[in-house]
Image (cartoon, coloured by chain):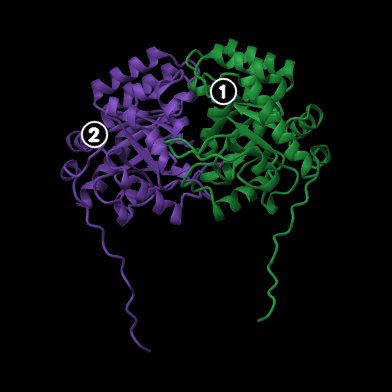
Chain colours: A green, B purple
Amino acid sequence: NRSVQVPVAPKLVHKSFGERVTLATNPAAVKLFKLMESKKTNLAVAVDLVNKSEILALAEAIGSEICCLKTHVDIVQDFDQDFITQLQSIAAKHNFIIFEDRKFADIGNTVKYQYENGVYNISKWADAVTVHGVAGPAIIDGFRDGLKQKGAGLLILAQMSSKGSLCVGEYTNQMIEMGKQNADAVLGFICQEKLEAMGDNFVLMTPGIQFNSKGDNMGQQYNTPDYVIKEKGTDVIIVGRGIYQSNDPKSEAIKYRQQSWSAYESRL
Amino acid sequence: NRSVQVPVAPKLVHKSFGERVTLATNPAAVKLFKLMESKKTNLAVAVDLVNKSEILALAEAIGSEICCLKTHVDIVQDFDQDFITQLQSIAAKHNFIIFEDRKFADIGNTVKYQYENGVYNISKWADAVTVHGVAGPAIIDGFRDGLKQKGAGLLILAQMSSKGSLCVGEYTNQMIEMGKQNADAVLGFICQEKLEAMGDNFVLMTPGIQFNSKGDNMGQQYNTPDYVIKEKGTDVIIVGRGIYQSNDPKSEAIKYRQQSWSAYESRL
């Protein structure tokens, strides 16, 4: 019988958001790191509601607690320019960024049109947009003009929270590589864990966060704030139904904010 | 020196569209196989224009030549309900289906909202929509209610025409499996070649078709109609810039239609 050395995973070393401001090259990443450091929040809220008035009321109610508001403008029944104007004014008042979770996933020539044109004119108002790199790295070129005008950034889907996702393994590695090759355009990654290759210059955001749920009937799976920030080492939690479906979104937002911020502080 | 037997790939055996009507289980696939057989066209045209009037004029001009019109409604600057009403009337007059190339790529709960809600109300008018299965198979469940109401179908992205695409290998195999497990909901695949696992009950559509181009500066790559229908064994060619950017879209459409239909006939 020999004593066997059990290998221990190396502990992740975490820099503060303040230190990472100087490492980021994408303007929206710089803005977000600064905002999180000064406002002391790493909570993003996903607002999957279909009426303008409900979304604006929620944004106003929880604006003081969040660093990002995540939208799906293409589910808003009464979308119009006034909705964007009001949302931007609430974002300025409470100091958060707006990220449109469009999950662009076409070829470069098409995403350019989708980002800059159409009824939604996303490039005019979103500080960040999500992108699946499945079409290949040239998709990034479709965004360059639009991103520069606004100082916005891309969030690349490196991993997903849904059951049976194909954003895994070598696919994930290629998404990280795509981000690193385009660090000027990329704010960060949507992911479930910090992988070493991701570095410290990107913001890592994790969806699928809820205190009390095992999932829905369409494949969504949930984790807690503490688990993803402390154990998995990502930076921002994205909470959806746990807040916008609550009877008291503001109190819930405060709870999520407190747990995720103290998880962040405890890892420094 | 020995004589070496060079292995020859088994020749694909192709059934006619008419025979495949009886194999398909998705209502939009049945409709499309019938339409192609009777109208004698396997040409789809992608119309990536940003004004309502231009799109409608093109649809009217080439409607007699095509089996599908592929739209990106989210790039149309002056989109409104009248656009959809007029487009549907042109589609009925010339007997083609409308497929919205939305490339849905979120979790089931979100795509349900995106498909059925918002300014575009895609589920109300599109005969087919494209889907990336990257979030996992539960995405299909987000579409079921909407698909049933319209008798529509999903087109799953199994391969892409852009450089460095990650829709390859095991990812492609999983997309085919996702389609086969949900044959009632799935019209077919967007792909670059017929793979044996795809079977004969799905419609196989191939984008990135142009007579005279090597590609664009954002990663798009092109093939000819003859090559994909005869050599690669897919069913429908999707032509974009080769037709909508031509000075005479109608004559170009006739040329593409003739080459792709005779390629189809020659393989029977």
Q: Secondary structure at mark 1?
A: helix
Is residue B262 among what the camera can see?
A: yes
Q: Residue at x 44, y 56 (%)?
A: B170
Left or right: residue B215 compared with residue B233: right
**Residue annotated with mark 2:** B27
Q: Residues within 10 Å of mark 2 (few under 14, many from 20)?
A: many
**Residue annotated with mark 1:** A244
Left or right: residue A262 compared with residue B247: right
- Judge by depth and name the residue closer to the eye, A219 or B232: A219
- Judge by depth and name the residue closer to the eye, A163 or B12: A163
Q: Position of residue B244 (x, y in %)?
A: 42, 30
- Judge by depth and name the residue closer to the eye, A132 or B108: B108
Q: Secondary structure at mark 2?
A: helix
Q: Position of residue B62 (x, y in %)?
A: 32, 27
Place residue B34 in its image quadrant: top left
Is residue A126 among what the camera can see?
A: no
Give me the chain letter of mark 1.
A
Amino acid at dot 1: Tyr
Q: Position of residue A192 (x, y in %)?
A: 60, 45
Give me the chain letter of mark 2.
B
Residue at the outermost bottom position:
B1
**CA gap, disc 1 to disc 2?**
37 Å
Amino acid at dot 2: Pro
Above or below, B43 relative to B83: below
Q: Position of residue A124 (x, y in %)?
A: 63, 21
Kindly check if marks 1 and 2 are in contact, taking CB atoms under 8 A apart as contact.
no
In the drawing, what numbered circle is on residue A49? none
Left or right: residue A142 compared with residue B188: right
Above or below, A51 relative to B43: above
